[in-house]
Amino acid sequence: MPGKSTKRTFYIVDLVRDRKLFTNLDIPPIRVNVTIEVEADVPKAKMDRMEKAARDKLEEYEDIIVKEATKFNTQIENLLKAGKLQEAIGVADSVNNSIKGALRSAEGAANMAVEAAKKKEAQGDKLLLEARVKTVVGFVFGAIKIATSVARIGASHGGDVHAWLSLGKDVIKIGLEIHQQLKKEPQLRKDLVVAVDTYLAFRKTVVMEAAKKAGVNEALKMEFPGVIKLVAQKVVDAAKLAGKDKDPAAVLKGIGDFVLKGVMTKVNDAEKTRKAYREQTTIMRHKVDDVSAKGDKLFAEMKKQTTLKEGVKIGAQCMQIRGKATQLGKLLDEAVTFLENSQKTLENAGLNCDDQTMLQKIAALDKATIFEAGSSIFENISAIKDLVDAVS
């Protein structure tokens, strides 16, 4: 009969989180699917650290890809300025090859990082040290090409109305996508608040069950997590009065395990809603960066269109988009930071988490003006759409 193995599967919704530095390129999202399998019975905490090793290594390759794409972006910019459109389009093939090469290297590097983490975790554990570990990294993304609007502007040297109209429609398209993402945000945020609230309430109920089981009535007036230590101490004191020896650390662990087992189902519910909100936030941030960068390009094109009466109005809307996109980007960064921090709390089943602190963080997220800031950008997008439609 084969021995037990432990598997961990996770994914990264997009390896490249920031595309502001290479707006001449259309690089589709790069999803990463990762599976780590160890031929041994491995505790969750150790698997968490192996997963972190893989994530950290993949983030290093995110930096490599951004630097490569930025280098090619500059090359395309220079070729377009020199009127060499076909050469600029051909650069996209070089970008594809370069990034595919980086991703191949990333897979091997992630494997080595997990192997190193396993050896570190295996100190004093011969079975884990000898266990084989297999890390499979898969990337899902489409072909990279030069941005359509950029190609048209390059072909016309900025003199063709159809060229900047194409760029204007790009801005509108991304704006509409942000608008669709915004529709999901309030509900996802509400789902997260409800799930974590339910988890905290349920956790307290389970702790109270443990207190009653131990006959510790004063625990009913205490806040979490101090109540766990109180219950453990009371059990130890009661054992001493009865002339029995009890190890305080063992009692504390036993009560902690009891609580952990009781709350895990609610932890899973909260973690599911956290991931859904995090992914939606990540996707929206990409689009906000994109609309800001393309809005800047459209503004630059409007400055050249001295005979176009709508040009000044479109340019003014583009300038407003820049400021509002910066504001929205900061809000999204704050949301992502909160969601990453709450992951650590939930992974530990919150046994070391103060209820009040957690609730304050949830309340702060609930007050965030992500929806309002995004809706404000959409007002500018709508104005641009009306002006572009009029020119069309």
Image: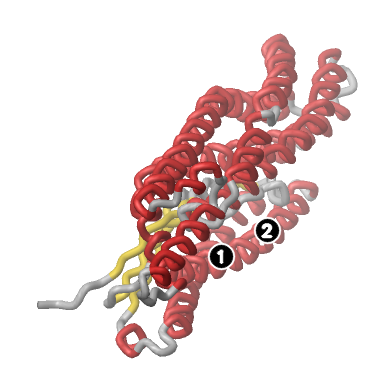
262 and 79: which is toward the camera: 262
Residue at figure coordinates x 78%, y 30% from the top left:
324
Residue at figure coordinates x 40%, y 60% from the top left:
255
Residue at figure coordinates x 66%, y 51% from the top left:
88
Q: How is the image coloured?
A: secondary structure
**Is residue 13 among what the camera can see?**
yes
Percent position of residue 277, x then y:
52, 38
214 and 101: which is toward the camera: 214
Residue 156 has which mark? none
Q: Secondary structure at mark 2?
A: helix
Picture quadrant where residue 329 is located: top right
Amino acid carrying mark 1 in the image? Ser
257 and 330: which is toward the camera: 257
Q: Secondary structure at mark 1?
A: helix
Q: Is residue 236 above or below residue 367?
A: below
With 161 as the anchor, is 45 left or right in this view?
left
With 129 as the anchor, is 381 left or right in this view?
right
User: How far is disc 1 from disc 2 in space, using C-alphas?
Assistant: 10 Å
Residues at discs 1 and 2 in contact (Cβ within 8 Å) = yes
Q: Earlier in the sequence, mark 1 or mark 2?
A: 2
Picture quadrant where residue 370 is located: top right
Percent position of residue 308, x then y:
84, 17
Circle 2 residue: 72
Circle 1 residue: 98
214 and 155: which is toward the camera: 214
Name the quarter where the C terminus is drawn: top right
